[in-house]
Image (cartoon, grey):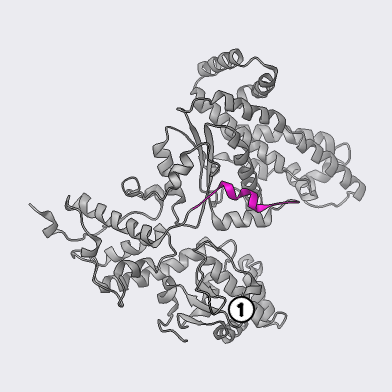
Amino acid sequence: MNRQKDFKFRKHDNIGAADAEDDKYLMDCFIDTGDLETLLDCKDPHSVIVGRTGSGKTALLKMLENKAKKVVIIPPESLSLSYISNSTILRFIENLGVNLDIFYRLLWRHIFTVELTKKHFNIQSEEDKRSFWQKIWQRFTDQKNRKALEYLEDWGKSFWEETEYRIQEVTTKLEKKLEGQIKVTIPKGIYGGQIGGNTGITEEQKKQVIERAQKVVNDVQIRQLSDIIELLDEILDDPQKQYYILIDRLDEDWIEDTLRYRLIRALIETVRDFRKIKYAKIIVAIRQDLLDRVFRLIRGPGFQEEKYESMYVRVYWTDKQLLEIMNVRLNHLIKRKYTKQPVSIDTLLPRSVDKQKPSEYIICRTLKQPRDVIHFVNKCLEQVINKKNITVDAIKTAEGEYSRDRLRYLADEWNSDSPNLLEFSKVLRKKQFRFMIQVLNKACEEFCLDFTCRNLGSNDPKIVKSYLSQLAFQAANANLDLESFRNSLVQVFYKVGILGVKLKSYDSFMWSSGHRGAISGTEINNNTKLEVHPAFWRVLGVINKEEL
């Protein structure tokens, strides 16, 4: 019996979930663009997966976890780093200007050393621990390795405790050393009650505190941990036993922002340190906007961002690959539920939508992310319950819902940098989809005045501290010319993906979903041409008719 003749889409049919954690299609429908093989190679330096929301970073980690045999997953929220955040003395010295980056790297090295050791020796009980010590002391007898082993011995039982306990233990040791040095210079009451302030501290005292505290931080056990890394390289010497530590969801609220950025910076540095181990690899997934924010806010003297480039696996998708995602997942849905025969996507979609091939119509309304394709097609399937095909009307109706969702999700993604993105996107309402930049002049002027009047005297930090909000206030009060506001707004819209730009008459339109994530203000002038991304035409009421 050919069940395909009786096939009809049913309620709750979909081609996957937005979150890879819940995506039942992931294992069967994963499209490998070559990144997975690179990540699995422990000798390959690429170890930081960088991409936008929905690009497939978590999917790569899930596939790696499934394919590799020896994997340790470290969720950032499980580290319980609030102890560091609440440390009176650490906050005090950091606010004075003491650099704690070495200490943060110590924490990550300690965590990774313990996790790899426990995984390799399968330490789960007291008997396992005793067996480990016996094996390790018998195997490594030279002086250099003995020094590394002394580090493990120093920590005793706490070395094997849960990560939260170990982090607290490491932090407590540093606090005691710092307190011992600082109390020589200033009374405890000052650094105990004047967090972040210098009240009661002379400039000479401040200088002495910084010097003493920095010396204590710089003398933490980095040398011993360097020896540990070399020791691990000797222990993990079997190419048939490769170990992977996976870290994801760094964008979530696992610690307050300032400390989170410093810990992420230290994490990336530590990932570089552990590349010395041939058969172990730490792999981190991080959103592009978060990585940009970390390096923008946490920059030290002589910082060179390009030195990290060799570590990045940048996740990009071509139209052809996105079409393959759509095709494979629709096929999987139908074959799994209705027929074993392969189904062509062309038989499910109409011949054309607005004189465009339907699959191309859908893909060009995405920001080139798999999650967008999945979301759009799922919206289409909601419109065709008890029908055999996805119709033009279904695609058009789905597009309206998808467009509203896409702008809202974009605002969520960029909330830290541009918390008022939804509000500012109103400047583009009812515009032609392609226009010269001067068209925005009047809309920007009206918006700045209206925005300032509505938010006058606001105490909302999302309003007061927002970069775009400040520019709007300045423009409304004639402290900033409107052209500068307009150009800054275009820069933001380009970076997040709402606008494409054509800087020269002989250029083609550029999009941040390509390899150029940002443009400078000096590149924008009155000859710049703009295009609203098709993903946002419906929600912004953009007119699909070219002005020029």
On the picture, is 95 further left or further right than 436?
A: right
Q: Reply above or below: 465 against 266.
A: below
Between 92 and 244, the residue placed more toward the observer is 244
Examine the rendering and report whether any part of residue 294 can be seen.
Answer: yes
Residue 310 is covered by the magenta coloring: yes
Residue drawn at 48 percent across, 54 percent down: 315
Residue 485 is covered by the magenta coloring: no
SS at mark 1 in the image: helix
Residue 322 lies in quadrant:
bottom left
On the picture, is 333 further left or further right than 101?
A: left
Between 409 and 235, the residue placed more toward the observer is 235
Q: Reply above or below: 488 against 62.
A: below
Residue 356 lies in quadrant:
bottom left
Residue 258 place in picture, x, y as percent: 66, 52
Q: Amino acid at mark 1?
A: Arg
Crowding at mark 1 (Cα within 10 Å: few <14, some 14-19, many 20+): many
Q: Reply above or below: 31 against 69.
A: below
Examine the rendering and report whether any part of residue 123 can be seen.
Answer: no
Residue 335 place in picture, x, y as percent: 21, 51
Between 365 and 473, the residue placed more toward the observer is 365
Residue beneath disc 1 = 486
Residue 110 place in picture, x, y as percent: 62, 33
Between 209 and 114, the residue placed more toward the observer is 114
Q: Which residues are magenta?
A: 301-314
Residue drawn at 91 percent across, 50 percent down: 203
- Looking at the image, the residue that sits furthest to the front is 506
